[in-house]
Amino acid sequence: MDEGLRSELSKQGIFTTTLEELYNWGRKNSLWPLGFGLACCAIEMIATSMARYDLARFGAEVFRPSPRQADLMIVAGTVTKKMAPQVVRLYNQMPEPKYVIAMGACAISGGPFKQGYNVLKGIDRFIPVDIHIPGCPPRPEALVHALMTLQERIDAQVLTGPGRPRHMVADQPADFPVPQFGEHDLVPSKNPDVWKAPATTVAG
Amino acid sequence: MSPQPASYLTLLLLFAGAVLFALGPLLLARLWAWKFAPAKPGKDKNAIYECGLESKGDAWVQFRSEYYLYAILFLIFDVETVFLLPFAVSFTGLTAGAFVAMMIFLLLLVEGLVWAWKKGVLTWR
């Protein structure tokens, strides 16, 4: 519908919408996160869901104990290489459409433990992350901001056409490959469909 | 006075409305899912949920049937406590008949305990 006609109609007290907008409006206001804390960021996540910061204002307070009922994964904390396969597997078990918030320095890059032999340098090497929150740990306000940003993203999603979500594309596989424990590192060490190594420049 | 057929028609209409009210949203949801949320099964997604780990072993675990003895012993003491407390509370106001009945009841339970004791259930192995 033409935007001008729409605002004209709304001035006359006539509200117009589309099924897509209605659907996205419902979805963005009822995100169900997976109750899933990995390290200290989880404490901030718990604080966010409690009365003081009150995540329930955004309809996202129903932390689910099973991935089958969740559509938002908040990766809150350090992802060790021991834990990474489980994280990817839980993500695979969530029903579509699903979203990921990588919370804190560890989840987005490995953080202060980046040089550790056992720490994954960012969960975005294996699963598609929608929102990255920096901070060590990020304050609850940061998580609320991330959630609001995600809500804006969901609101702008289209269901048909070239920009349609992954689960509407028939030839996209349902599962992301789960890494295995190799001799020295996870095998594969990253999912090239999801993560590209940043371009490096050689000095001189 | 016989009931009018028209009054039953109202009931029928209400019933149809109730069924539609219940089934309509479900049908709409199914229709929406068919068009905009097609099923996307996968190996991991169809697997048993076990906190991210792959499940090991079989869910058909066997228990020893001898545990029934512990259940019976528990019942003896449990039932005894349930009846002994009101018995003790109202002890002074009881008739001789009620007292004898309670003693017979206790005797039956103690009999069970003696049987279990002789069977060797009370020794922990």
Image (cartoon, coloured by chain):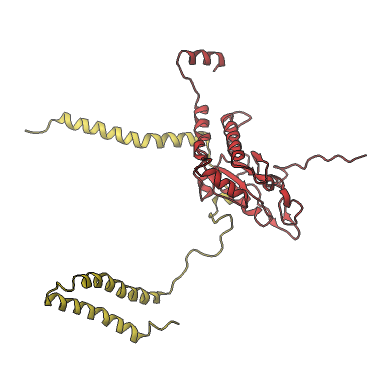
- State which quarter of the image contains the C terminus of chain A: top right
Chain shown in red: A
Tell me residue A63's x, y (percent).
51, 46
- State which quarter of the image contains the N terminus of chain A: top right
Q: Colour of chain B?
A: yellow
The extreme right residue here reads A204
Q: Residue at x 72, y 57 (%)?
A: A118
From this view, report whether residue B31 is shown above or below residue B72. Answer: above
How many numbered badges does the structure rendering display?
0
The extreme bottom residue here reads B118
Viewer-closest of A56 and A27: A56
Let me know if residue B58 appears in the view.
yes
Tell me residue A159's x, y (percent).
56, 31
Viewer-closest of A172 and A127: A127
Along the horizontal axis of the image, is A104 left or right of A15?
right
Q: Quadrant of residue B114?
A: bottom left
From this view, report whether residue B31 is shown above or below residue A125. Answer: above
Let me know if residue A94 appears in the view.
no
Q: Residue at x 62, y 47 (%)?
A: A75
Tell me residue A35's x, y (percent).
54, 49
Along the horizontal axis of the image, is A85 left or right of B34?
right
Q: Quadrant of residue A83?
A: bottom right
Tell me residue A3's x, y (percent).
56, 16
Viewer-closest of A82 and B15: A82
Q: Residue at x 23, y 78 (%)?
A: B106
The extreme left residue here reads B1
